Amino acid sequence: MLKVSEWNLMDYLKTEKDIQGYLEAAFAEDDAQYMVRALGNAAKARRLMSKAAKKAGVARESLYRSLSKTGKPQFSTVVSVIHSLGYRLALTRA
């Protein structure tokens, strides 16, 4: 009998290298909503949602909603999450 287990992204975001690779792949898609969800997943994996929420000046539950599939966070919230993960934004020519 074949055993099937539920796939969970958090099982694959164990190291900083895993998280960075995941974020780089997500940002390469040029899909803003996907990027926001990836940031939320990375913050969850590193257990930084409370820190990110505090930095963004929002409640943790509000940040979870903002970074969900249907969320629409303010740009300042996205930047705060990026900073809380230890990254910064940089522009490069396409």
Image (cartoon, rainbow, N blue to C red):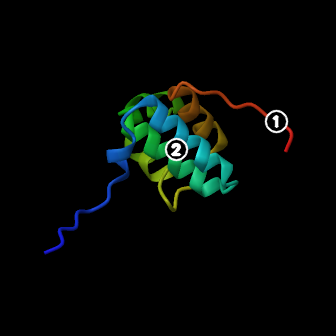
- Residue 79 position, x and y percent, is 62, 34
- Residue 74 position, x and y percent, is 62, 45
Farthest residue, direction bottom: 1
Report the number of numbered marks.
2
Above-or-below relation of 5 to 43? below
- SS category of the residue bearing label 2: helix
- Whichever of callouts 1 and 2 sits on the residue coming sooner in the sequence is 2
Observer able to see residue 73: no
Task: Give the residue type at disc 2.
Answer: Tyr
Which residue is located at x 64 percent, y 47 percent? 27
Which residue is located at x 52 percent, y 48 percent? 38
User: Image check: 47 left or right of 54?
Assistant: left
- Residue 57 position, x and y percent, is 51, 32
Which residue is located at x 35 percent, y 33 percent? 47
Q: Nearer the viewer, residue 14 or 64?
A: 14
Quadrant where the N terminus sits is: bottom left
Residue bearing mark 2:
22
